[in-house]
Structures are given as C-alpha cells and as structure tokens.
Image (cartoon, helix red, strand yellow):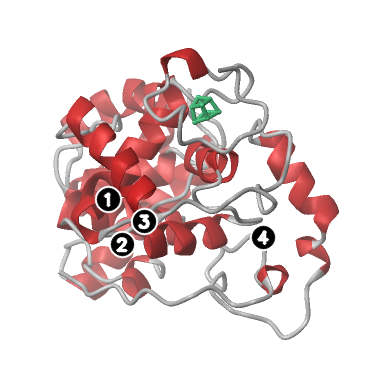
Amino acid sequence: MAKITRKPLPKSRATVSPRAGKSKAKSKVRSKAPAAATPKRASKAAAKSGQSRPTTKRTRPWTEAEVREAFSRFRKANPEPKGELEHLNPYTLLVAVVLSAQATDAGVNKATRALFAVADTPQKMLALGEEKVRDYIKTIGLYRNKARNVIALSEKLIAEFGGEVPKSRAEIETLPGAGRKTANVVLNMAFGEHTMAVDTHVFRVGNRTGLAPGNTPLEVELELERVIPPEFMLHAHHWLILHGRYTCLARKPRCELCLINDLCRWPEKTI
Ligand code: SF4
C-alpha cells in the first residue's frame, strides 16, 4: 500500500488551479493565481455543488476528537461502505469510472451491465470495437468521446501495461479519459489505497461541514487526507459520498437525520 505523506496545505489556496481534480496538470502549484481560481469562479463552483458559501473559513476548525467522532459514527452506521458503480474487476472499474464523468452511477450501471457481460478485459473491448461500444453506452452523456477513450485506454493498457490496470496514480493518469479522480477511485476500490476521490458530493460535504474547506477538488482532497485519521481512510471516500448523496443533499440537506449534525459547522443547517 502506497504511503501517503500528509503535508500542510500551502498558505495561499488560490495558487491551485480549480480544474486540478480533472486535468493531468492539476497538482501543479503556481506562483501566480490563475484567472480560473478567482473568488468568482470559486463561488460558481460552490453554487453548483449546492453550497451557499464557498468555504467555512470563518467557522471554527474541527478538532481531532471531533473528526474521529464523526468517522466513528459513519463506521458504526455502515462498517463496510460500498461504491455504487458496478464492476467485475479493476479494468471494468476503471472503465465505469471513466464513463461516470458527468453521469450518474445508476445511468452508467444500466449501460455497463450489458457491456461488461461481453467485454470485461481490454482485449475483449478492442475486439468489440468502438462502434459497438458506442451502441452499448449511448444512453450516457458524451458517449462518443467516452467510447473513443475506452478503446484508446484499452489499447494503451495492452501496449504498455500488459493488459493490467497499473497501480500508480501517475500511470493511471496517463490513460485516455482518466484524471486524478479516476485514479483515486481505482486506487482505493481496486487496490485498497488510502486515496480520497473528491466528486461533487465530497466537495460539498467537505466545504459545508467545515471539515475540509477548499476552493477546488484538489484542495478539499488534500485537506481531507490531512485531517482524517489513517484508520478511517480506506472507507472515508465512500462514507462522505454516501453522506452527500443521501443525507447532505445539495438543495435540501436532511439535517434532522444527519449523524453529524452536532459537529457540522454549516451556519444554514436546519437543526
Ligand atoms: S447538519 Fe445538515 S448541512 Fe451539516 S452535514 Fe448534516 S445534513 Fe449536511
């Protein structure tokens, strides 16, 4: 298991590109704030994710004991949380995550059940061909581009990685259609690494609760890695996603049912 080095965040969070969670150059720290990292853009991202304030910097940070308490409650309620993207092996997980960009897990599962029944390896996917892959996934948004990526990443896996999904973030990120979030999901779910994939739900929960404020997915990811004790990291990604998907909803959070409503710092919580 790869060792995660937890470092304090740079003093100026505005030096990190807001597209860091998606692009391959995302972890670059720049000496000058790019236009995309302006507060205006941050507010837009915050609004899109259903939070009315970009971060909770003004609120009191969580103590170590509070973080431990929150994740102990998540663990007690759901000791073995599972992701909702259906897959058969690391390869089909990788493909499912690539297909899930800007799509729901349920929508991806609907398409991949039939696709993976006939193609659960890169070799079988190539034999199927781009046109047929496109037919299988045409109910998913951006399916033409995604079908192209699925074929291209399958070719690359065979040509460069012996047909196996590589186990390093840098290598996964070289695959067509795979960015940092994809790599984090695959490393966590397929290989048990303590990575933190930040999707829209984790981004919202991290900011809204004040647990890990950040203007970009990368900032939230690094802050979550910094504050969450290692014993919770294997499942933390799923606990936070499920919390955001079913309890801390974007438009109408269900604060009355929330396991951590006494710890949450969101000034607008309804309890
Ligand atoms: S109290 Fe409400 S806003 Fe806070 S984490 Fe729970 S559901 Fe979300």
Q: Quadrant of residue 239?
A: top left
Sooner in the amino-acid sequence: mark 3 or mark 4: 4
Cβ at disc 4 under 8 Å from ligand 1:
no
Residue mark closest to the camera, 1 vs 4:
4
Residue 200 in sight here: yes
How crowded is the residue under tag 1: few (<14 C-alpha within 10 Å), some, or many (20+)?
A: some
Circles 4 and 2: CB distance less than 8 Å? no
Q: Is mark 3 within 8 Å of ligand 1?
A: no
Residue 18's disc is: 4
**The residue tagged with tag 4: helix, strand or loop?**
loop
Q: In this view, does 82 lie above or below 64?
A: above
Q: Earlier in the sequence, mark 1 or mark 2?
A: 1
Q: Mark 1 points at which residue?
A: 126
Label 1, label 2: how many angstroms apart (C-alpha)?
Answer: 7 Å
Quarter of the image where one finds residue 196: bottom left
In front of the other: label 1 or label 3? 3
Q: Quadrant of the N terminus?
A: bottom left
Task: Name the front one of labels 3 and 4.
Answer: 3
Nearer the observer, 131 or 5: 5
Q: Label 2, on which residue?
A: 155
Q: Would you call the spot at circle 4 few (<14 residues within 10 Å), some (14-19), or many (20 or more)?
A: many
Give the residue drawn at x 33%, y 73%.
Answer: 171
Amino acid on which the number 2 mark rests in the picture: Glu
Kind of residue at disc 4: Pro
Q: Is residue 86 above or below residue 122?
A: above
Q: What element carries label 3?
A: helix
> Which residue is identified by label 3?
64
- Spot occupied by residue 255 in the image (x, y as percentages of width and height): 51, 19
Badge 2 crowding class, 10 Å Cα cut-off, few under 14, some 14 to 19, many 20 or more, is some
